[in-house]
Image (cartoon, rainbow, N blue to C red):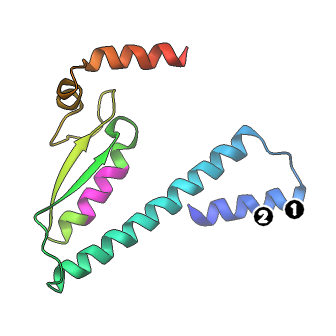
Amino acid sequence: MFYILNEYVKIYKTNNWKITKTTLNITKIKNIYLLLIYYIKKISNIIDKFKMGELKLKKIAIIGTLDSKGEEYSYLKNIIERQGLETLVIDVGIFEPSIEADIKNEDIAKSVNESIKMLQEKKIEDML
């Protein structure tokens, strides 16, 4: 994916195209990709410290919006669990999650006296 984005940038620079919405979306994808790589490296460092006995962990919490980024969080969860660590997945999204969470978005909404349905309606209204 990174290679494809680099090639796109080279073509863009060569032809001096105007920046379009598509270009901005590709830039956003590249930034998300780089951010994911950054966090995987950070987690790898934590796992290395854990394996060497420098760090004692019980669980690693993964907090995110599982309605829009479920696949990414699932990938992260699998990496952590393959290293022999436990995870606790917490969904802070407001729509239907694409993967199962240990702590569901409904539970979080209830903890602040909100309804997930009300939050969804507010979000939809904001989008209109």
Is residue 78 covered in magenta? yes
Quick check: 53 above or below 101?
A: below
Q: CA distance from mark 2 to mark 1?
A: 6 Å
Q: Which residue is mark 2?
A: 10
Magenta residue span? 72-79
Q: Quadrant of the C terminus?
A: top right
Give the structural element (helix, strand or loop) at label 2. helix
Where is residue 96 shown, x and y percent of the image?
30, 28
State the residue in front, 44 or 22.
Answer: 44
x and y, in percent, of residue 57 in the image: 13, 69
Q: Position of residue 48 (x, y in %)?
A: 25, 81
**Could you tell me the amino acid type at mark 2?**
Lys
Q: Residues within 10 Å of mark 2 (few under 14, many from 20)?
A: few
Percent of width and height locating residue 32: 51, 54
Residue kind at label 1, given as amino acid type:
Thr
Tell me, yes or no, whether the two marked residues, 2 and 1, touch with CB atoms within 8 Å.
yes
**Direction from residue 51 to residue 68 in the image, left or right:** right
Q: Residue at x 57, y 56 (%)?
A: 31
Residue at 25% over, 19% down:
114
Looking at the rendered image, the quarter that the N terminus falls into is bottom right
Crowd around label 1: few <14 · some 14–19 · many ≥20 (10 Å): few
Task: Name the residue tied to disc 1.
Answer: 14
